[in-house]
Image (cartoon, rainbow, N blue to C red):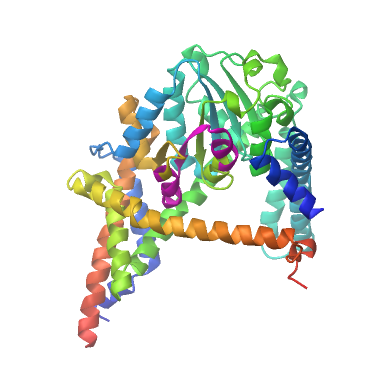
């Protein structure tokens, strides 16, 4: 089944065979349906995990209670039933998204600024030659991305672009090609039946 | 413990406090620092200006959630303003669950109706399409088979005149994708660029930029908008200063803090090293 399902997607990508393309398209649409249904599994799973925590009064159970309340509210108000005033235009749904989820999401991402500043101070120390290279290139990249520096020293832009476009690109290409070769090897092993861990979520026999 | 030792072992809470002050100060008291225009901003502006022609059809894809909004939302708004100035049709869609809701927030900043664009005729919102890369591949072969109804009115795609001429990837001239992760540019490239030759331009968060450079260099991605600073430059090129210009002073001061702390930290590191010798 794995071989058939894989080849069904791979062959039409490279060869124009209408019959295979149609079958592949049908299989792909089936996958979309399965993924869409999996959304419900996700919601149920979240509710079950947090309901258990509330039931057992484990540490921080009240946060789990909050999650349950908001999941239920968002699911109910976001149901695609426009004739009942529900869906993405629902005022409660929109209020929660705009005034709770959006600032919380932004805050989570913005916390990175604090961690990066702290990490840069600790990591950017010229302990040896390799660390010195990281220090210099990292600091130049930081400076090349801030108008406060590039206004006064315009050449910083060229330097940071050079670091980004030459050494960085060479490294990233190496990483990408290596990962792609690894993926091809894994695919071939799977197709040949050597790699069977995915069937039971464990390792090989 | 000497002062250099103290600097060397600076409590992270002090660093956090300094970072907070350096970010907050310019947001309350804007510095209005001049913003030089980089080649990235020019490439993006020139691509949209010169390579998006009247009559083209564009996919406008928001592949991020609320966490990506601080960095990606300003460039999404600015690009939408640029696109709306042209006589193009556009399809809004996302393979991230929150994408359509972020687009609703964008509509509060830019209303296509103000530019004479009619929903269903000049643009359409297909909402979230589940399935990641598989869904991208399916959409490329058939819009109508992959999406049952539109996101705004919940009506079949056949009800909208714009969809009469949009059936497969071959009907699309450009993808504009703003993204924070997977699925994102590599998936678009595999399913739409390599397979159908559709041009793609990508706006991404700063940490994703190194991974995008090979695609830019190979020409697979036609233009890249790397982070908030370049968004601010793009807003200036458009002559529509907005959210990014407002935030770029904070980028400057936070970067200044990092450089200062790195310099002081290294001085302290070497001085304590000498003392120990």
Q: Is-magenta flag for residue B231?
A: no
* Res B25 seen here: no
Q: Is residue A45 above or below residue A20?
A: below
Q: Quadrant of residue B1?
A: bottom left
Nearer the observer, B35 or B38: B38
State the residue at coordinates (68%, 59%): A188
What secondary structure predominates along the stretch shown in magenta?
helix
Residue B2 x %, y %: 24, 79
Q: Is-magenta flag for residue B213?
A: yes
Q: In the displayed orientation, state which residue is furthest to the top.
A: B116
Magenta region: B190-217
Direction from residue A119 to residue A61 in the image, left or right: right
State the residue at coordinates (24%, 87%): B276
Direction from residue A129 to residue B148 in the image, left or right: right
* Res A197 seen here: yes
Q: Is residue B216 above or below residue A166?
A: above
Q: Quadrant of the C terminus of chain A?
A: bottom right
Direction from residue B94 to residue B156 in the image, left or right: right
Residue B12 x %, y %: 39, 66
Residue B145 x %, y %: 74, 29
């Amino acid at each position: 089944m794995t071989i058939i399902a894989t080849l069904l997607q791979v062959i039409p990508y490279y060869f124009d065979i209408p019959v295979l393309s149609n079958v592949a398209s049908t299989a792909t649409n089936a996958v979309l349906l399965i993924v869409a249904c999996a959304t419900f599994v996700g919601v149920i799973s979240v509710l079950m995990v947090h309901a258990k925590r509330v039931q057992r009064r484990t540490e921080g159970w009240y946060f789990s209670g909050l999650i349950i309340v908001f999941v239920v509210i968002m699911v109910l108000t976001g149901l695609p039933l426009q004739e009942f005033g529900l869906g993405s235009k629902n005022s409660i749904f929109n209020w929660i998204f705009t005034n709770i989820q959006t600032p919380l999401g932004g805050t989570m991402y913005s916390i990175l600024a604090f961690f990066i500043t702290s990490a840069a101070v600790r990591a950017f120390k010229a302990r040896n030659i390799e660390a010195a290279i990281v220090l210099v290139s990292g600091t130049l990249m930081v400076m090349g991305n801030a108008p406060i520096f590039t206004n006064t020293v315009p050449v910083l832009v060229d330097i940071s672009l050079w670091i980004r476009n030459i050494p960085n690109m060479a490294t990233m290409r190496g990483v990408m090609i290596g990962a792609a070769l690894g993926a091809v090897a894994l695919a071939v092993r799977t197709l040949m039946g050597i790699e069977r861990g995915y069937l039971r979520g464990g390792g090989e026999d | 413990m000497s002062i250099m030792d103290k600097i060397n072992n600076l409590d992270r809470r002090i660093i956090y406090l300094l970072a907070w002050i350096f970010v907050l100060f310019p947001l309350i008291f804007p510095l209005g620092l001049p913003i030089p225009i980089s080649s990235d901003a020019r490439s993006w502006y020139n691509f949209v200006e010169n390579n998006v022609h009247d009559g083209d059809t564009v996919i406008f894809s928001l592949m991020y959630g609320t966490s990506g909004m601080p960095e990606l939302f300003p460039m999404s708004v600015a690009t939408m303003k640029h696109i709306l100035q042209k006589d193009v049709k556009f399809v809004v869609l996302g393979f991230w669950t929150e994408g359509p809701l972020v687009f609703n927030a964008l509509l509060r900043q830019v209303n296509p109706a103000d530019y004479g664009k009619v929903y269903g005729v000049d643009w359409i919102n297909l909402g979230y399409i589940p399935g990641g890369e598989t869904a991208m591949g399916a959409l490329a072969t058939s819009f109508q088979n992959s999406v049952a109804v539109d996101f705004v009115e919940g009506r079949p795609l056949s009800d909208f005149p714009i969809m009469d001429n949009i059936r497969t990837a071959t009907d699309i001239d450009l993808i504009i994708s703003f993204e924070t992760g997977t699925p994102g540019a590599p998936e678009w490239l595999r399913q739409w660029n390599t397979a159908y030759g559709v041009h793609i331009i990508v706006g991404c968060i700063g940490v994703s930029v190194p991974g995008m450079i090979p695609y830019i260099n190979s020409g697979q991605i036609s233009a890249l908008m790397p982070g908030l600073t370049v968004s601010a430059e793009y807003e200036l090129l458009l002559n529509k200063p907005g959210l990014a210009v407002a935030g770029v002073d904070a980028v400057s001061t936070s970067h200044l803090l990092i450089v200062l702390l790195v310099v002081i930290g290294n001085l302290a590191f070497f001085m304590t090293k000498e003392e120990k010798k």
